[in-house]
Structure formats: structure tokens, C-alpha cells
Amino acid sequence: MPQPPLFVVTAGIDQGRRFECKTPVTGIGRDQTNKICLLDTEVSRRHARFVQNNTGFRIIDLSSANGTYVNGTSINESELFSGDRLQIGQTTLLFTTPTDHSDLADKISMISRRETREPSQIIHSIDHGQGSRLLNDPTQAGSPWLTQALTNLDILFQTVREVSRTLDIRQLLSTILNLIFQTVKADRGCVLLHNESTNDFSPCCVQFRDGIDTRTTINISQTIIDHVLKTGEGVLTSDALGDFSPSQSILQSGIREAICVPMQGRHNLVGLIYLDVNTPTQASTPSHENRLTEEHLKLLIAIALVAAMAVEDTRYYKAMVQSEKLVAVGQTIAHLSHHIKNILQGIRGGSYLIDIGLKEHDELKMRQGWNTVEKNQDKIYDMVMDMLSFSTERQPALVPSQLNTIIQDVIELTQPRAEKCNTTITFSPDRALPEGLFDPDGIHRAILNLITNAIDAVESKDRGKIDITTKHHLHKTPIMEVTISDDGIGIPESRLENIFTPFASDKGARGTGLGLPVSKKIVEEHGGSISVTSGDHEGATFVLQIPVKPT
């Protein structure tokens, strides 16, 4: 089943929201009847219509007050392609169309080893990192033209290879500029990136020829830049002063030769690559021979195209990641808001009982109310502590600690609630368990969450039972093992896969869905692991394994 087209809000009040278009016609606007309903006040109630059919995808403006823009161009109706940016009001939506590969399996049949009668005769093999060796020595080509062509091809190959290695735009463009200088004998060079919000160009990276003072400022001729922007074409000038005379910027910069090419993306200009020569030719070089040639111009145009695509793809990827993060934040806030609301309702109910008890001089009601308030105070404290533990990336504060002592402290803390539930907690410690280096507060939190979870599981039984054991395993790395078992309601197989996923709790108002994920995170911060075995109505067993770091 192919995935439907998708709009992701990358800018605006709805940033981070995702809209799947599962119907042939999808309305876009502020009115709630629209499938893509936006909160932006500059969006009309019925702003635009997205249409999909066998021929492709279209966006139609519905005579909106502020217009509809595709990749910065105002439209009444326009075709849409994956990667296009839709601007309505202050909202920017990124359009993407997942590729359907569902029918490819029917077109390919793998021949089994048993069906092959003759052994494979592989002549030669080469790993992907050695692919450029075809071009390693272009000087052996035999002619200057072919030598230059192979050199250019080698540089282009390396450029494409670098594109796949990083998502850092500045690092990528700096590497590409360095590759250019390996074959183009320019004095200075830089990459300028276009800023859409200010509509100007800012330097991303610079490069100087060996021997050039890198402390000097690169004075780029605005005349040459304007020419490239006006024509949309790469330009080579072998006589900058003559070609652009009387340009004051060229006179002041002392530019003799220059190349400037646009980094044209799929829809918009991403930036510019600029090289120039301002030093005199060597005495051994004929005066008519230039260091920048038409072949260099062609090479830079090809490189600029690859670089522009890489910049666009990186920005697209980061926009998608950011939207995913924003969605995750929104979901987290929604979950927390739900639990906080339940807790506040509990506190309000307890306060009401206290108030009634005071008015009626009923001590029993006051005690009941206070117990309710106290219980909900504990809930909000636990939730805050779990959130802090889960949201913070940290290194455990390792101090010499006794695991058995920590578990005993947790049992004493949870014993009153266990007794209220008619639950028996038994502890069988390994007395030979050595002292180890770990974070006692973190491990205390992890085990507290697991025992609390076990009490929740047996609460509905007349008599519940929880067994806790510790063991010491001697391997290459000694391991402390904690086993917590209960005879409660168990965990259905369908839930086991997501048992450590945040907010996956099915306890309703009793749980936040953070306890088990926090325990897992703390144990993993110690280099350990946590596992669970269970079945529906068969109880559950959690096993913690923590490497022993000697004191």
C-alpha cells in the first residue's frame, strides 16, 4: 500500500505538524472543515485546495486574501513536486511524495543456489572506497585534453563522494572548495550562501592559494556577482578590468581573472562559488596565458550543481528532523498535561474533603482529604524526578556502594503501600555481593520504579507476592544481577515490545508511562541492561544486569 503525499509545516505557528493527504481533494485553510487546518491568522478560512489524480499533484488558490506561493512564486494554480515549498500567510509547508515500491517484488526473482549448475566466475572485485582509482593518475592519459578531462572527472567524483559523508553544510562546502583548489590555480575563493529571509549572500567558507597571506580580506566584486544573479549563468572573465570596465570594485580589488557560478538548486538559488586571480602571471608564463579557463568554468558549474543539491537535501533533512522533534515535544506536553490534570484533580478533591471536614469538625474527613493530597503530592514528585532522569543526558556519579543495601532501603520505602495491598515482598540477597562503583541515587530510582510497578501489577489480587533476588556472576566483566518477579496480571505479548517506550502506560490515571523507560535509561547509563519476560495473567519478571566496577 503506497504512502499518501505529506505536508510538513516547517515554519509558522503550526510548526512541526504533519498532514497526510489520503483523499483526491484536500482543503487547506483556517476553517476547521479543512483537512489541513492551520491556526495562522493570515491564512484564509478556505485558502487553497490540494488535488491529486493519475497525472500528478496540483495546488489551487481559492482567491485567498494573501495569496499562495510555490517556491517563492505567487500562483493561482500550479503543479507540485516532491520537495516543493508552499507558502501561505506566515506558514511554510514542505511537500513530499513517498515512492511506492510495492510492486517491485513481482518483477524480480532470485535464483536459488540449488538451481545454479555452474559456479560463479567472478573476474575481479573492488571495494567502494577504491572506486576513484580509475582516475588516480590522469597524467597517463596521453593527451593534455584527456588529462584535463580525467582530472575534472576525478574532482567531480570526489565531490559527490564527500556529499554522502556529512550533513554539516559548512564542512561540506569547505571540503568542496579545497577540492576545487587542487585543480584550479586560483589565488582566492569562497562560497556564499543565500539567506532567504534577508535576500543577501553571506560567506560560508574561504580558501587561499599556498603562498597567499590568509590574513588578507577577500574583496569580491559586486559587479561580477550582480552579472551572475541577473543572467543566472556562470561567468568567466579573463580580463576583469576590460570586461567590466569601468567597475570601481574590480579596480580596487585588483582582480585580473575571475570565475563566479550560481549554486542553482531544484527551485531556488542556494548560493554562489567565486574564484579570482589578482597576482601577476609567472615570468615563465606567456603573458597571454590565463590561469582560469573555460574548462575550469564547466567544472565549477558541475560542482555547483552537486553542492546546491547537497545543501537543499541537508536543509530538507534537518527540517524533517526538526518537525519530528517538535511533534515529539508536542506529544510529550500532551501526555504530561493529561497526568498533571489528573493529579491536580486529586489534590482538589482532597482539599475539598479537608474543607468539608473543617466546617463539620469531622476529623475522619480531614484525614481522608489529607491522605489524598499527600498521595498526589507523591505522584507529582515522582513524575518530576522521572522527567529529570529521562530528559537529561548525564554520566552517573559513581561512588562505592552496596547494591543489597540500596534494595533494602527501597523495600522499606514501599513496604507500607505493599501492606495496604496485602502484598508480600521477599528479598533473597547474595551475601557475597561485592561493593561496586555506581550511582546509588540512580540505581535507587530504577529499582524503586520496578518495585512500584510490581505492586501496581498485584494490587487487584487478594494476596500478591513479589520476589527480589540478587546474584553475582563472574565473567570477564563481573556482573551484579537483580531479579524482580511478581504474580500479578502480567503483560500481554502485544505490549512487551513497547514496554520501555515513554508514555506507553495502560494504568490510566495511576501511571505516567515514564517509570520503566527511566529505569532502563539509568541501567544503560551504567553500561548494563534490563529485560522482561511475561505473559497475560502470568506475572512478570524483570532482570537488571549491571557491570561491577571495583572500588
Image: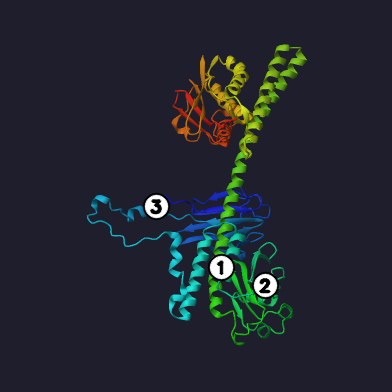
| Residue mark closest to the camera, 2 vs 1 | 2
Type of the residue with mark 3: Ser
Residue at image coords 66%, 25%: 378
Cα–Cα gap, marks 3 and 2: 57 Å
**505, above or below 14, in the image:** above
Q: Are marks 2 and 1 in contact (CB under 8 Å)?
A: no
The answer to whether residue 66 is visible is: yes
Kindly identify which residue carries mark 1: 179
Kindly identify which residue carries mark 3: 102
Type of the residue with mark 1: Leu
Which mark is drawn over residue 366?
none
Type of the residue with mark 2: Ile
**328, above or below 69, in the image:** above
Q: Which of pointers 3 and 2 lies earlier in the amino acid sequence?
A: 3
Kindly identify which residue carries mark 2: 212
Q: Are marks 3 and 2 in contact (CB under 8 Å)?
A: no
Q: In which quarter of the view is residue 318 placed?
A: bottom right
Q: In which quarter of the view is residue 413 placed?
A: top right
Residue at image coords 46%, 71%: 137
Under circle 2, the secondary element is loop
Give x and y (percent) for residue 452.
57, 24
| Residue mark closest to the camera, 3 vs 2 | 2
Label 2 Cα neighbours within 10 Å, binned few <14 / some 14-19 / many ≥20? few
Q: Are marks 3 and 1 in contact (CB under 8 Å)?
A: no
